[in-house]
Every structure is written in C-alpha cells, then in structure tokens.
Amino acid sequence: MSTQTATFADVPQLYKRHIFACFTQRPAGHPRGSCGAQGAQPLWDRLGRQIEAGRLAADVGFTPSGCLGFCGAGPLMVIYPEGVWYAPKSPDDIDEIVETHLKNGRLVDRLVMVFGR
C-alpha cells in the first residue's frame, strides 16, 4: 500500500475554467433583491450561446447557481479556478468577458467585483 497522499493537482479536471452564475429570482420588492430581478437571465443566455459559438464548451463549464450572497451587486458570476467575480450589466459585457477572460486569459478589470470578508 502506498504511503503517498494525493494532492489537488493529482485530480484530473473536467474543465480548464468553470463559471457559476446566479439564477436566483426573488419576488419584486424583496429587500435583498436578486440577480434575476436585475436582468441576469438574458445575460446568462448570451453567455451560454457565446461559449457554444466560440467552441469553448469542451474547456469551459457553465453552471447555473443559486444565490452567491451579494445580491445588491448582481447580476453576478464567478469563474474558477481563478476565483474571479464579475458583475456584467449588458450583452457587450458578456462578450468582453468571453473574449478577454475565457479566450485570452486576462481580467476584464472594469467588471471585476472584490468583496471584503
């Protein structure tokens, strides 16, 4: 029996990057708001189409999530393994994230969200 301990690096990864995007839709007037109430759905639809059209689906996972916890800043998405949070507001923002971050591995500085602990 081996005495070696596996590390995270030893586990094969399915994707190079994995996006989680908040699909939470709270009722109108809810005190926390929600990404859905702030127009997330058309943005995530566009993101999914861009991933497919750009032939990124083999390398980029895209998973709908529940609340990511920072409702007032939404719509929100987070890309791993980098752990970068973005708050896109328009279809052009989605296009820029796909081109700059997913295809070219660079941050879209103006859309990055930084949250304190």
Image (spheres, rainbow, N blue to C red):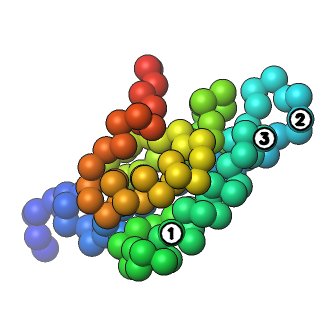
Residue type at the position of mark 2: Ala
Q: Residue at x 66, y 27 (%)?
A: 72
Callout 1 secondary element = helix
Q: Position of residue 64 (x, y in %)?
A: 62, 59
Residues 14 and 71: in front is 71
Question: Where does label 1 land, which residue?
Answer: 50
Q: CA distance from mark 2 to mark 3?
A: 7 Å
Residue type at the position of mark 1: Gln
On screen, residue 85 above or below 55 = above
Q: CA distance from mark 1 to mark 3?
A: 22 Å
User: Which numbered disc covers residue 37?
Assistant: 3
Q: Position of residue 48 (x, y in %)?
A: 56, 68
**How many residues crowd around disc 3 within 10 Å: few (fewer than 14), some, or many (20 or more)?**
some
Q: Position of residue 4 (x, y in %)?
A: 11, 63
On screen, residue 9 above or below 26 = below
Whether the residues at callouts 2 and 1 have beta carbons within 8 Å, the answer is: no
Question: Where does label 2 land, which residue?
Answer: 28
Whether the residues at callouts 2 and 3 have beta carbons within 8 Å, the answer is: yes
